[in-house]
Image (cartoon, rainbow, N blue to C red):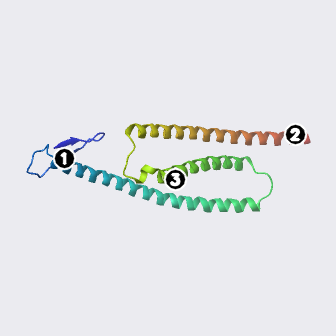
Amino acid sequence: MACRLSGSGSYTVVIIPLRTSLYSLDALRFYLWIKRLKDLEKEKDALCSGLEILEKTRLWYLQQLEENRARQGNIETKSGVGSCKEGAAEARSCLLRCRIQRVNGSLGSVMSEPNATSSSNPSLLDAVADSDLRWQNTVLTQEVSDKNLQISMLELEKDALLEQLDELQAH
């Protein structure tokens, strides 16, 4: 029996070593058993890939924590008003913080989702609707992050203009 895998250019050939017909209950059980094994292998590959990504992410988070501590130390030793360059860094920090919070939320939802660890699957329509809502949420979150960045940049520009105005009025 040959079946075409959807979305892939390859075929899977299953040879059923049974004395009975291809359409027998034993043949169906064997086919479903093979299919389940293949699905479990795909799940294992995805989990291993996720573990690799999580390890790289853990190292990146540790590096960011160290850089954050160093910046905190620098800010504590400095005094006075920050420059425009520091303002741009603050805006990037805000954007990065929003993205990190989004990733943390996604990871948390994967682990807390009731269907993530149980064998019962939601219906296909529910899964598609959930996926669509998650995508829309991601797009909206990105738009909010972009707007927050724009607001931060405009506030920095306003502060710089007010500072220039104060200097001009002082002269």
- Report how far apart the C-alphas of labels 3 and 2 lie in the structure: 52 Å
Q: Which residue is mark 2?
A: 168
Kind of residue at badge 2: Leu
Judged by depth in the image, the label closer to the viewer, 2 or 1, is 1
Q: Which residue shows up at 16% across the image and 47% down it?
A: 25
Q: Residues within 10 Å of mark 3 (few under 14, many from 20)?
A: few
Where does label 3 land, which residue? Answer: 108
Amino acid type of the residue that numbered disc 1 sits on in the rendered structure: Leu
Q: Is residue 165 above or below residue 108?
A: above
Q: Quadrant of residue 41?
A: bottom left
Which badge, 2 or 1, is on the more N-terminal residue?
1
Marks 2 and 1, how far apart at CA: 85 Å
User: Which type of secondary structure does the marked residue at label 1 adopt?
Assistant: helix
Disc 2 element:
helix
Number of dots carrying numbers: 3
Q: Is residue 101 left or right of residue 70?
A: left
* Quarter of the image with the N terminus in it: top left
Return the x and y of residue 80 as percentages of the image width and height.
81, 54
Q: CA distance from mark 3 to mark 1?
A: 38 Å
